[in-house]
Amino acid sequence: MPKQKINGSFMSLQESHPLWETLETQPFWWSNILNDPELYVEVRKDNYINVYYYGGCVALIYWTKDGLMAETNRKYVTDSFGMRALSNTSCYCNCQALFQSPENLDAIKRRIAEVYHKQPMQAETDSLKGVHISSEKMVQGKLILHSPYKFIDSELAYQTQGRKTMRIDLIELRNQMLVFVELKLITDSRLRHINDTPEIMAQMKKYHDFIHQDNHLEALKKYYHKILQIKRRIGIWEGKNTIESISTRPELLIVDTYSRMTKDRQTRIANIRKSLETGDSYFDFSIQKYQDLCK
C-alpha cells in the first residue's frame, strides 16, 4: 500500500493519469462499486481513491508500475473470506477480485459495521443513552449518500505548520459556491466547556485561516474543478462542473442526536447556541435535528 500523502499541494492532482483512464472504461468490479447505494467514492489529491461505507474504508485504489491496485484492510475480509489473520508486514491485501461480486461487497460492509462501527451493540447502547446515533462518521456517510451532488468531497486533509494534519469533514457545492463544513454531534464535548472557550472555536478558526491562507481561494477552485472533471470521467458525477466562488466563512453543522429530551439536555443545547452566537464571527453555525437531516 502506498503512503497516503497529505501534503500541502493541490497541484499534485493530475487530470491525465492511468488510474482515471482505467476506471473510465468501467471495469465490471468498478461498476459494482458505483452501483452499490451504500458506498461513496472520494478522489484524493495524490491521485488515488477511497471507497467508503459510512466512513469505513472499503477500498484504497491506486496505480503502481504494475498497474491498478485495489486494497482492503484485512480485518474486513479475514473472517468473511477465510483470509489469513493480520501479518506483521501489511494489514492490507489486494481485493480487486472480491469486488467482482456484489455479495462480496455486502460481506465487507457487514464486517465494517461489526468491526468499525461496533454494530449491533452500539445501536443498543445508543438507545439506552437516549440518542439516535453516536457515530459522527455514520452521520457524515448518511449526508453524502443522501446528497451526492451537494457534498462533493469529505475528509479533506491538509498539512499545517508543525506537520500537523487538519481535516475538514465535508465540502459542499451550494449554488456553484464551495462551502467548507465541520460536522459535530450535539454530544461532542468540544462544543461545550464550563469555564473557558469551547475547543470547537479554535478548530473553526483554523479552517477560517486555511481558506484565507496565501492563494488558497484560487487554488481550491481549480482543485475542485479538477475533482469534478475526474469524477465525471470515472462515473460518479453527473452534475455541473461550475465553481464560481468559495465561501470565506466555514460552517459548523451540529446534529442534535437526542432521542429523549431532558431539562439538562435542553440547557446544554441552549448554552452551546449562546456560546457560539457570542463568539468571534469568523464562521457560521446551525443546529439540526438528526431525524430531519436527510429529508
Image (tube, rainbow, N blue to C red):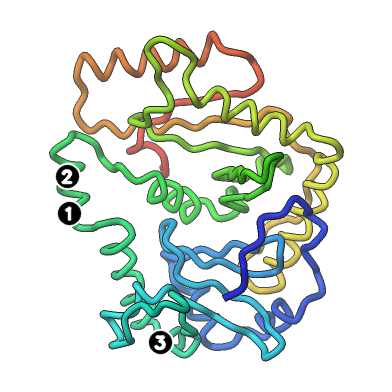
Front residue of 180/211: it is 211
Label 3 neighbourhood size at 10 Å, few (<14), some (14-19), many (20+)? few
Please give the residue where the numbered disc 2 appears in the rendered image.
125
Please state the total of marks drawn on the protein image: 3
Q: Earlier in the sequence, mark 3 or mark 2?
A: 3
- In the rendered view, tell whether residue 117 sits above or below residue 218: below
**Image quadrant in which the N terminus is located:** bottom right
Mark 3 against mark 2, which lies toward the viewer? 2
Q: Earlier in the sequence, mark 3 or mark 1?
A: 3
Label 1 element class: helix
Q: Amino acid at mark 3?
A: Ser
Q: Amino acid at mark 2?
A: Thr
Pointer 2 with pointer 1, Cβ within 8 A: yes
Please give the residue where the numbered disc 3 appears in the rendered image.
101
Front residue of 83/252: it is 83
Please give the residue where the numbered disc 1 appears in the rendered image.
121
**Image quadrant in which the C terminus is located:** top left
